[in-house]
Amino acid sequence: MKKIEQTKEKQEAEVYMGIKGMISVFNDETNYLKEHNAVNYVIGVTKSYPKKIYDFFDRLETKKDNLLFKRKFLFGENARGTMPFIEKSKFCEVKYLPYSSIVSINIYGETSFISIFSEEPIFFVIKSKEIADSFLGYFKLLWKIGNK
């Protein structure tokens, strides 16, 4: 009789804090998208980012446009019209949900991260196909109920 071994997926989790942590997390995301031509999914964009974070996103999304990266965003309804560099991009699809939060979830490949945009931003990066797939399922469900 053969012993059947269940292979367990390797999972990693890291925590990043502050602006330097934010830059590191988004640089990793951009590098992955560049190497794998993947789609980036984001849940929970809000209008209440501090100016330095807003300016960072403006530069980051312009860079992603220049690299032809496809992205899908679920914004809080209160963010409508506040991020034209995303909303007018031909590489982005945006839908709106009737809620707002300082927490967002980014999903790409087998990685997802939860961002908390408080006074000092905090990022929980999770490398796990199972978890990324779960968040992607959540994204797809919300996408169906989002408004253009």
Image (cartoon, helix red, strand yellow):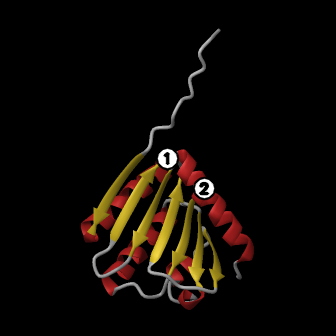
User: Which residue occupies 30% across, 62% down?
Assistant: 16
Type of amino acid under label 1 = Ser
Q: Nearer the viewer, residue 25 or 118?
A: 118
Question: Is disc 2 placed on a helix, strand or loop?
Answer: helix
Report x, y in % for residue 32. Answer: 45, 50
Tell me what residue is drawn at x 44 percent, y 65 percent: 114
Q: Residue furthest top?
A: 1
Name the side, left or right, on which 122 lies relative to 44.
left
Q: Is residue 82 above or below residue 75?
A: below
Q: Residue at x 63, y 65 (%)?
A: 139
C-alpha gap between disc 2 and disc 1: 10 Å
Quadrant containing the N terminus is top right
Q: Tell me the residue at 47%/87% (across/down).
A: 47
Extreme-right residue of the structure: 144
Q: Position of residue 53 (x, y in %)?
A: 35, 79
Q: In this orientation, does residue 88 appear? A: no
Indicate whether 3 appears above or below 33.
above
